[in-house]
Image: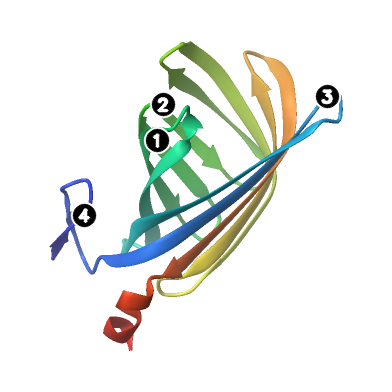
Amino acid sequence: MDLGIDGKRRDSVNRVIVKVTGEQKDAAGDVSRIEMTAMGEHYFRNGKHYIIYEDTSLAEGAPASTMLKVAADSLTLTRRGAVEQKQCFSPESESRSRYRTPFGDLDLCVATQRLDIAYGSVSGRIDVSYDMHINGEWQSANELHIEVEVDASERQKLN
């Protein structure tokens, strides 16, 4: 067993590179795009992949520890730090949550249209299409693409 970056014990922790690309289209048709790459950790437990990394793209560069829990048919995103959030994505379903920021809380609702997960033992790809409502009002149509690749230093360990 190893200790993860959050100090908790993990079975077979692997260093990974996490690449996140997000696109939002608002009511006016304006598109905004974010791209972020971070080093992180991956482990597999109870049939689910867990990816943990620091995201600095959310609150003016302040870090938020982000955990992705990837199951065969769902994705749960949990953030702690500069922002606090737990959001579930499951095909053709809605999920409500509270998004806590230093400036106040927002009520979020995501309506997932599509969730594609292709995952191997450590590396994988996740694509999500969803609509976001904030405080009951439609905000944007969103595309989220996440790639997780085993770090080069870990490849020999896996072979």
Above-or-below relation of 112 to 119: above
Q: Which residue is mark 3?
A: 27
Above-or-below relation of 104 to 66: above
The kind of residue tagged 4 is Gly
Q: Residue at x 55, y 17 (%)?
A: 107
- Where residue 36 sits: x, y (%)? 53, 48
**Quadrant of the rendering where the N terminus is positioned:** bottom left
Which one is earlier in the sequence, the residue at label 2 or at label 4? 4
Which one is earlier in the sequence, the residue at label 3 or at label 1? 3
Q: Which residue is mark 4?
A: 4
The kind of residue tagged 2 is Val
Q: Residue at x 37, y 35 (%)?
A: 64
Determine the image quadrant of residue 84: top left
In 3D space, how far apart are the residues under numbered discs 3 and 1 (Cα atoms)?
Answer: 27 Å
Q: Which residue is mark 2?
A: 83
Task: Tell me, for residue 128, which label it has, or none.
Answer: none
Which one is earlier in the sequence, the residue at label 4 or at label 3? 4
Q: Nearer the viewer, residue 45 or 25?
A: 25
Which one is earlier in the sequence, the residue at label 1 or at label 4? 4
Q: Which residue is mark 1?
A: 79
Q: Residue at x 53, y 51 (%)?
A: 74
The kind of residue tagged 1 is Arg
